[in-house]
């Protein structure tokens, strides 16, 4: 029993997921300190280490048969926390990111609630859909571009934020329809039973 617990929650890939969450929290503090005059390079190092860890944890889990149900949930949670930390940190410098934060919270909150309700009904949640992966990729790309060019023209930052919000909104709408379909299927199973 104890061994199963450790395999499920403390496999190497899952420890890497916990590490990414810790890095996200460290990142916010380090980014804020750069606004107070601290060197900027640690911000980039933390993002690179987090990205490499994200890349490796899945590969290690699959190669060494360490895929766990907890890990399937932990990996996207670590992604969401990392993206949320970057978005949140950038609001210290760019107030125009506030609407993106609001959209991000609503989208992720809806997905967490819908996923939880489906799990309670016994539905097995799959990984991210293609449009969700594209949204995550575009969000990372835009946020990293803004981070890599700290003196970027504000009009360019605003344009990038609007592009990101459009992609995020598209993914959100697709997920609304996706989860709606799953709820109808689950309700149909209950009616047939």
Image (tube, rainbow, N blue to C red):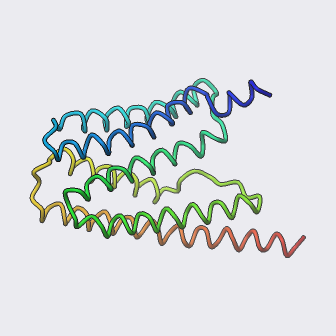
Looking at this rendering, what residue extends furthest in the right direction? 193
Residue 188 at what x, y percent from top left? 79, 74
**Rendering coords of residue 41 (x, y %):** 19, 34
Which residue shows up at 61% across the image and 68% down it?
179
Residue 144 lies left or right of residue 135; in this view the side is left
Give the image location of residue 97, x and y in percent.
27, 64
Comparing 140 with 88, the one in front is: 88
> Which residue in the rendered view is the most extreme toward the front?
36
**Front-most of 44 and 193?**
44
Question: Which quadrant: the N terminus?
Answer: top right
As drawn, 190 above or below 71: below
Q: Quadrant of residue 184?
A: bottom right
Residue 33 picture quarter: top left
In the image, what residue occupies the spot 90% across and 70% down?
Answer: 193
Give the image quarter of residue 74: top right
Q: Position of residue 102 (x, y in %)?
A: 38, 68
Left or right, 59 with reference to 148: right
111 lies above or below 20: below
């Amino acid at each position: 029993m104890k061994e199963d617990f450790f395999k499920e929650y403390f496999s190497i890939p899952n420890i890497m997921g916990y590490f990414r969450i810790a890095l996200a929290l460290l990142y916010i503090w380090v980014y804020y300190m750069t606004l107070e005059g601290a060197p900027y390079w640690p911000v980039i190092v933390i993002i690179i280490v987090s990205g490499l860890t994200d890349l490796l944890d899945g590969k290690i889990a699959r190669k060494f048969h360490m895929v766990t149900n907890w890990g399937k949930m932990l990996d996207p949670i670590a992604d969401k926390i990392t993206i949320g930390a970057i978005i949140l940190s950038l609001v210290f410098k760019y107030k125009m990111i506030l609407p993106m934060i609001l959209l991000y919270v609503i989208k992720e909150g809806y997905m967490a609630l819908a996923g939880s309700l489906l799990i309670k009904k016994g539905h097995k949640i799959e990984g991210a859909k293609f449009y969700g992966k594209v949204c995550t990729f575009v969000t990372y790309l835009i946020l990293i571009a803004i981070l890599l060019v700290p003196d970027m023209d504000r009009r360019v930052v605003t344009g990038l934020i609007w592009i990101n919000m459009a992609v995020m909104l598209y993914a959100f709408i697709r997920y609304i329809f996706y989860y709606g379909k799953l709820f109808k299927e689950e309700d149909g199973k209950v009616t047939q039973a």
